[in-house]
Amino acid sequence: MSLSASAPGPCEIQAGEMSSSRAAKSSLLALNQQGELEDLPRDYPLSTSEDEGDSGGERKHQKLLEAISSLDGKNRRKLAERSEASPKVSEFSVNSEGSGEKLVLSDLLEPVKTSSSLAAVKKQLNRVKSKKTVELPLHREEIHREVAFNKTSQVLSKWDPVAQKNWQAEQLVFPLSKQQSIFPPIEHVVSGWKARTPLEQEIFNLLHKNKQPVTDPLLTPTEKASLKAMSLEEVKMRRAELQRARALQSYYEARARREKKIKSKKYHKLLKKGKAKQALKEFEKLRKVNPAAALEELEKLEKARMMERMSLKPQNSGKWAKSKAVMAKYDLEARQAMQEQLARNKELMQKIQVASESVEEEGGAEEEGEPFVPDVVNEVQVKADRPNPWMFRNHSGDTKEAEVQGDPEELAEPAAQEAPESEEEGPVVAEEILLKEFEERRSLRQKSGLNQIAKPVGSQEAKDLSSQEVLSELRALSQKLNRESHQSRKQELSSTRTVLAVQRGEPSGEEEEPLLLQRPQRARTLDELEELGKEGCFQNKELPRAAVEGQQLERNPSNHLGVPKEKKRKEQMTDLQNLLTTKSPSMKSLAVPTTVEELEDEERDQRQTIKEAFAGDDVIRDFLKEKREAVEASKPKDVDLTLPGWGEWGGVGLKPSAKKRRRFLIKGTGGPEGPPRKDKNLPNVILKEKQNIHAVAHQVRMLPYPFTHHQQFERTIQAPIGSTWDPQRSFQKLTMPKVVTKPGHIIKPIKAEDVGYRSSSRSDLSVVQRNPK
Amino acid sequence: MKVKMLSRNPDSYVRETKLDLQRVPRNYDPTLHPFEVPREYVRALNATKLERVFAKPFLASLDGHRDGVSCLAKHPKSLATVLSGACDGEVRIWNLTKRKCIRMIQAHEGFVRGICTRFCGTSFFTVGDDKTVKQWKMDGPSYGEEEEPLHTILGKTVYTGIDHHWKEAVFATCGQQVDIWDEQRTSPICSMTWGFDSISSVKFNPIETFLLGSCASDRNIVLYDMRQATPLKKVILDMRTNTICWNPMEAFIFTAANEDYNLYTFDMRALDTPVMIHMDHVSAVLDVDYSPTGKDFVSASFDKSIRIFPVDRSRSREVYHTKRMQHVICVKWTSDSKYIMCGSDEMNIRLWKANASEKLGVLTSREKAATDYNQRLKEKFQHHPHIKRISRHRHLPKSIYSQIQEQRIMKEARRRKELNRIKHSKPGSVQRVSEKKKRVVAVVK
C-alpha cells in the first residue's frame, strides 16, 4: 500500500494520432508490461492489500477492453489517465509509452509526405531540423532565481569556517550552547532582600550611613560630588602635575639604583668624603646660626650612637664563630679561639659603660668633634661583625694581647672570604691592571706608612692602629673646630683614614690597606720593623708558596690559629700580599681554557676506552660472514635419504653404494639456477626473502588512506596510548573521545550565537508578509 | 645526635577521599613495559570482539498502530515523547521511557501524510489524504472534553508533507506546490511552484531557517528561499528522491534519499556534483534523518533495514534489521543522539541504540575511561586485517545478502562494459564520467 503511494506512477496519456494497428500492438505491449509490474509486489506479501489488488484489476480490465476495441480498426480517442494528486497536467509528460520506440518527428510527418502541396512546409521543417537549437534567453524569473541563489550562497558561506573547525576539532561537546548561569546584578539582589540577622542589619546600617547606592549607577554621593567639583582644565592640570611628579620619582629611583650598583671603591670613597664634608659644613653653619639647634643635633647623634651600642650583636652568632663552634669539638686551637672570642666579647660588654663614661669625661672639646664619629662606628659595625674599634682604643692598654690574638682571626676571616671572591672577578687583563696599580700604591703607602709609624710611636696614645685612627680623627676634628687654620690638611688625612678603617674588612682591591694599617701595631717590636724593610724580597720569594697558602686559607682558615704569633703574622702578611699578587695565575688555572683541555682529554680517554673495549671485534668481517651464512642457508639443499645397511651390508667402513645414494638423493629444487638473490649486488645488505606467514596474517598490506608514507603509519602504531605506558594525564588526553554528548540533554541545531555570529534580527515571516505572491 | 630518616610527602600516597582510587606509583620506564605494540594490538582485538559481542542495538518495539506507520515526529522539548501517524489516519503519542502510547487521535481519513511539532512543543500539525491540515494540542483533552483539533484548514489539493519553521509561527506544506502558512491564517501567505509534479516532502533548514528544500516526483530536488518567496535552484537526479534532510550542524549540506538505493549528500551551493554518494541499501531509500551532532545519519529503506552512515563515508557503519521488521517507511534520530526510532509497514515503531554496543545508563569514571581507551584502540588498529574483519562483520537476512551479491555482479558488469567500450573505441571519443557526475542529470537555474 505504501509502495503504491510512494512510487511514481507513470502518466499514461496516449496520443490518438497513431495508426490503428500500431495502437493495438502498443496497447497489448502496455498490457504485458503492466502485468509484469503487477507481478512485482506479489513477492512482498505484506505490501499487497485488498483495495490495491482491486484497482490493479480494474485497470487491467480497462486496458483489455481498449485493446480489443482497437482491434476493430476504428480509431478511438484515449482519455488521459492520471495517477498524480494534481489537477494540472504538464504537457511535457506526454510520452510515447507502449510504442516501443521513441516518437520522432519523421513519424509525425509521414502523412504530410504524400501531399505535394505542403512542400514549402516540408522544406521549412527540414531547415529547422538541420539547424542547431539556440539557448533560450533568460526569463525574468530565472534572473530572479539566479540572483536569489547567489545571495543565499553568500549567506551560507559564512558557515564554512565553522563547519571546517568542527571537523578538525579534537573534541566536540554537545549540546553546543552552554547553559549560562545568569548572575543578576547586585542591586537587584540587594533590593529584594531584607536584613534579618543583627550582623546583616549592621552592614545595612553602614551602607545606608555611607549612602551607598543600591541601584544603577553605582556612585556614592561623594563620588558624584567629586565628579562635579573639578572642571576639565583643572583635572587635566592636576593630572599633568601628578604625571610629572611620578616621572621625577622614577628618574630619581633609577638614578639611585644606578648609583647603588656602582662597584668602584674610589667612587664610594669620594662620595663618603663629600658627604662627611657636607655634614661638617652644615653642622658648623648650624652652630653659628643656631647653637641650640646644633646641640640638639649633637644629642640626636649621640642617642643614635647609644642605640647602636645597645644593639650590639651577640658575638658568637657570626659566620666565623659558627664555623669555629663546629671545629671546636675536634680542634684544640679552634676551641681556644672561641674562648678568646667569648672572653673578649664579655670584656667588651663590660666596657661599654666605661667607654660611654670616658666619652663623657672627655667633655665639650671632644663632643664637638663627634658629629661624624658615631657614623664611622656605625659603619664599622654594619660592614663587619667584629669588635668595635672605637672601644678598642680606649682600653687598648690592658687588652693588647687579646687584640693581637684577635687580629689574626679577623684577618684570617676576611682573607678566607676574599679568596673565592677575587677568583670570581672579571677577566685576567683587568686583574693585571689592578695588580700594577697595587704595586704603585704599595710603594707610595710604604712611604706614608713609615711616616705614620713614626708619628704614633711618638705620641703615646697610639697602640692599636684602628683605634688610633679614630682617635686621631676625633682629635683632628676637635682641633679643626678650634683652630680653623690648621684644618684643611689634617682633616683630609683623618677622613681618609676613617674611610680606610671602615673598609678594612672589605676584600679584594683594597686589601693592601689593612696590611698597611696593621703595621704600626707590629712595628712596636724590632723584628717586625726589620720585616717591614724586607717586605719587598718577601713578595718575590713567596710567590709560588702563596697560592698554596691561599688555598689552604680557603679550606680551613682556622689552621693558622695555632701557629706561633710571629710566624703567623709573617704568614698573614705574605699570604695576603700573595693572595693579591697570585690572583691572576689562580684565575687562569680555574678559568675556561682549562675546562676545554679537560674536555679534550676526556674525549681522548673515551676514544681510548672504546678502542680497548672493542679491540678484538671486526664488525665488517662478522657481517660478511653472517651474509655468507644467510646465502648458504637460503640455497636449496640436497636431501640424502639413503639408509646405510638397508638392502645391503652395513657396518664400520662400509658405505652405501653409489647407485643407492644416487637413487635416494633428492636434489634441491631451484639450486643455483633459481632466481638470483636480491642482495647479490648489495654488499652491505642482507635481504631476507622469506616472509613470516604467521605474522603476515596480522599485518597491514596496503598503506591506509590518510597516510602518505609508511613511516607515518608505523609511527602512529608504535606510539602506545595505554595507561601502562603513559602517565594519567596524557592517557586521558590520548583517549579523549571525539564527540561527547550528555545523556538526557537535547542537542539543538547549531545557532549563529553559538559560534559568535550575529543572528539576523529580522524575522523570516515578516519578509514573507511584505512581498506576498 | 641527629638521626637521618627517610621521609615522604604524604600527598604522594594519601588519598584525598576514601572514594578515590589507591594511588599506585608507577615507573614509566619503557624498558620495564616492553612489547607495547603487540600488547595494544591484542587489547584492540579483544575490544573489537567484545564490541561485537555486546552489539545488541534493539531496545523496544512500540506496538499499537493498526496500520503501517507513515510518519514520525520528535518532541522539541521532551526526549521521552514521540509522535507517529499511521496509514489509517491515526496519530499516536508515545512515552519512550514507559514505552507506552499515552494518547491516540483519529486525525484524518486516509493516510496521515505528514506530522510535525511546533518549535515550542505545545502543539503539533498533521496533514492527511483528506486535504486538510490540522493543528492539535500536545496535551490531551481534559476530562469530558472532546478530542478536537485547534485549527483545521481545508485545502484544495492533497498535502503530502508538512514541516514547521524552527523559530517562528510558520509552517510549510507540500503537495501540488509548496505553501508557506502563517499559523494564524487559513490561506497560505505564499506558495511556490516550479514544475507540475507533486512534491513529496518539504524541509526547513534548521540553521538558516528561511531556506527550504523539497523533492518532487519528477525526480528533482528544489530549493526555496522563504524570504524572497522564490525557488532558488533545481537539481534533477537519475531517479526520484523520496525525502531530504538538512544537516543540523552545517547549514549548506543536505542528504537526499533516492529511489535508486542510494543517498546523495549535496552542498547546496554546488548542486552539479554530490559531495558524497552513500550506497549500501539494496532497495529504495524511503527516509533519512541526521543525528543532532551532524556526524552521522540514519536511512530507512524498502529493503526492510535501516542503516547508519557517517556523513563523510560512502558506506554504512551499521545495519539494523529484525525478522519481523518490514519495509521501513520513516526513521528519526532522537535529539540526544543516543537512539533511533523507525516506523515500518508492519505497524510497529522500533527503538534502537544509535551505537550498537554502547552501555546504557550512567557509567562510572573507570568504565568511561575503559570505553574511551577501547574506542581509541579500535581506531588505532582499524586497518589491521583481523580487526577490520571482525569489526565489519554483520549478519544480514538472506534476501538482503543475496541482493547485495547480485548488485555487486551487476555493478561489476557495468563497469566492465564501460571499460570495454572505452577500450574498443577511438581514443578520446568515449569520455569516462565519474560516478558522482553520472547521477546528476541536470541542474536547472
Image (cartoon, coloured by chain):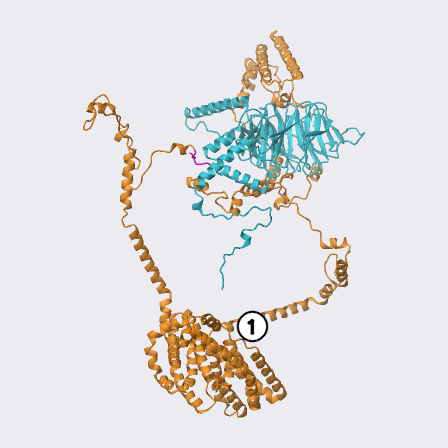
Chain colours: A orange, B cyan
Outermost residue on the front side: it is B1
Q: Nearer the viewer, residue B361 or A16?
A: B361
- Three-letter amino acid code of the residue under disc 1: Tyr
Label 1 SS: helix
The quadrant of the picture occupied by the N terminus of chain A is top right
Chain of the residue displaying label 1? A
As for residue A4 lying within the magenta part, the answer is no
Q: How many marks?
A: 1
Outermost residue on the left side: it is A653
Please, is residue A758 above or below residue A558 in the view?
above
Residue A144: which quarter of the image? Answer: top right
Please, is residue B287 above or below residue A340 in the view?
above
**Is residue A507 visible to the viewer in this orientation of the structure?**
no
Q: Position of residue B255 (x, y in %)?
A: 58, 32
Q: Position of residue B125 (x, y in %)?
A: 71, 31
Stretch of the chain drawn in magenta: A698-707
Q: Position of residue A657 (x, y in %)?
A: 19, 24
The quadrant of the picture occupied by the C terminus of chain A is top right
Which residue lies under the disc numbered 1?
Answer: A252
User: Principal SS element in the magenta part?
Assistant: loop
Outermost residue on the top side: it is A72
Q: Nearer the viewer, residue A42 or A723?
A: A723
Q: Nearer the viewer, residue A589 or A464?
A: A464
Residue at (46%, 43%) from the top-left corner? A719
Q: Position of residue A597 (x, y in %)?
A: 33, 62
Residue A16: which quarter of the image? Answer: top right
Please state if A253 lies on the left or on the right of A658 as rendered: right
Q: Nearer the viewer, residue B101 or B189?
A: B101
How crowded pointer 1 is (Cα within 10 Å; few <14, some 14-19, many 20+) is rated as few
**Is residue A16 visible to the viewer in this orientation of the structure?**
yes
